[in-house]
Structure formats: C-alpha cells, structure tokens
Image: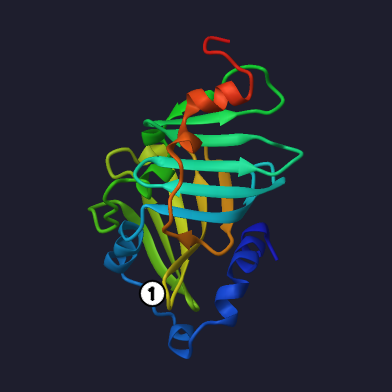
Amino acid sequence: MNRRSLILSIALVPALLGAPAALAQDERISLSELSRYFNSFEVAEAEFTQVNPDESISTGQLMIHRPGRVRFEYDPPEENLVLASGGSVNIFDARSNQGPTVYPLRRTPLNLILAEEVDLSRERMVVDHRAEGPTTIVVAQDPENPDYGTIELVFSADPIELRQWIVTDDMGRETTVILGDLELGGSLSSTLFSVDIEMQRRGLRSGQ
C-alpha cells in the first residue's frame, strides 16, 4: 500500500463503517451541496493528524472561523502554531525566538474553503470531482492563479462531512490533514486568531 492509499485508509475508516448502501455505488456529492456545506457554518473544531511533506507525523487541534481565520495548534513536544488571520498565514516555530514566518493567505489553496462565500462551481475552480466508493473527492485551485497549488478535499456523506484535505503547494509539496469528528457551530474567541497576542504569549516582540 502506497503512502496516499494509507492516508485515505486512516481518514475514511469511520466513514466506511457507517456508509449507507446507496453510497457504495460511487455516488458523488454535487458541488452545490458541498458549497452549501461550507457556507452553513462559520466555526468548526476538530482534532487532526498531519502528514508533512517529509512524511513525519504531527497531531493537534484545528480551529476554523470563517471567513479567513484558522488556527492549527500542534501537540507537545512540538508546540508549533499555524495561524491564519487578516489575510496572512503566520507560522510560529517553537524552537525559534523570532517572530512568525508570514505568507499571504490568498497564495495558499486553503484560502478557497476559508472564503466568505464558498462556490466550488466557479469556472475553472474544480479540476477533479469524483466518487471513490462512499466518499466524494474534489480537487480545487484558484481559477485566476492555478500556480498557487491545489487542495484535494475528501468528504463522507449522510451527513456530509469533511474528512481530510491534501494541500499541494506551488513547489509541489504535499501536506495532508486528516480530521477527527468536525464539530460545527459554537464560538471561538477572537484572541485565538490574534498574531499580536500570540507573540506576547511567546515572549516575542515585533521586529525581532
């Protein structure tokens, strides 16, 4: 079994165990239904397992606050953090006494599902849409900037639920995030997505 098959197996065991018979016949969920799924919530939380480009494994807690905000808290001993807010992705390295490495959110495929209004039916956004047994897989890109990379989204159904994604960046590197049960709704404090507050918590100063 190759690495990609192993990742899918880990992510989809819960979905396969509970799959209704109808979905076993390769029925894909429509793009309009998947868009409505994303647009139905602002807040979501889940535990995650991440397979990094070097094939190392990380775990942690994911917090999403659409539009445009996400927080990946990594479990010890890493204690790293990825924080998207204000149009930027900020990567905090726990081993560094410097401020975060910063990238524009719009240059990452994750921006597609953090948009205020997700519309997977936009022309040239979806480059692959298929069913694999009881799951639906969608590969999406920025229609105006396909060179930014792609995000492959894997969904179970009945009810629709995002189970994992694979981000391929502009260098061709793959990062896979496998989600636990995604809890939708509730509230998250805005301080969780504040870069300044995170820098203060880590004892960092702007300009370091």
| Residue 97 seen by the camera | yes
Relative image position of residue 17 (x, y in whole percent): 60, 81
Q: SS class of the residue under badge 1?
A: loop
Residue in view at x 36 percent, y 72 percent: 29
Q: Nearer the viewer, residue 53 or 114?
A: 114
Q: Quadrant of residue 39?
A: bottom left
Residue in view at x 68 percent, y 61 percent: 2
Q: Nearer the viewer, residue 47 or 167?
A: 47
Query: Would you name the residue on which mark 1 appears?
Result: 28
Identify whether 101 is placed above or below 169.
above
Relative image position of residue 50 (x, y in whole percent): 63, 50
Relative image position of residue 179 (x, y in whole percent): 57, 59
* In the image: residue 9, left or right of residue 166: right
Type of amino acid under label 1? Arg
Quadrant showing the C terminus = top right
Relative image position of residue 180 (x, y in whole percent): 59, 62
Identify whether 162 is placed above or below 105.
below
Query: How many discs mark residues in the rendered view?
Result: 1
Residue in view at x 35 percent, y 56 percent: 127
Identify whether 45 is placed above or below 160.
above
| Residue 170 seen by the camera | no
Residue in view at x 60 percent, y 26 percent: 201
* In the image: residue 73, left or right of residue 154: right
Categorize mark 1 by other alpha carbons within 10 Å: few (<14), some (14-19), many (20+). Answer: many
Find the residue positioned furthest to the right: 77
Q: In which quarter of the image is residue 139?
A: bottom left
Q: Nearer the viewer, residue 21 or 2?
A: 21
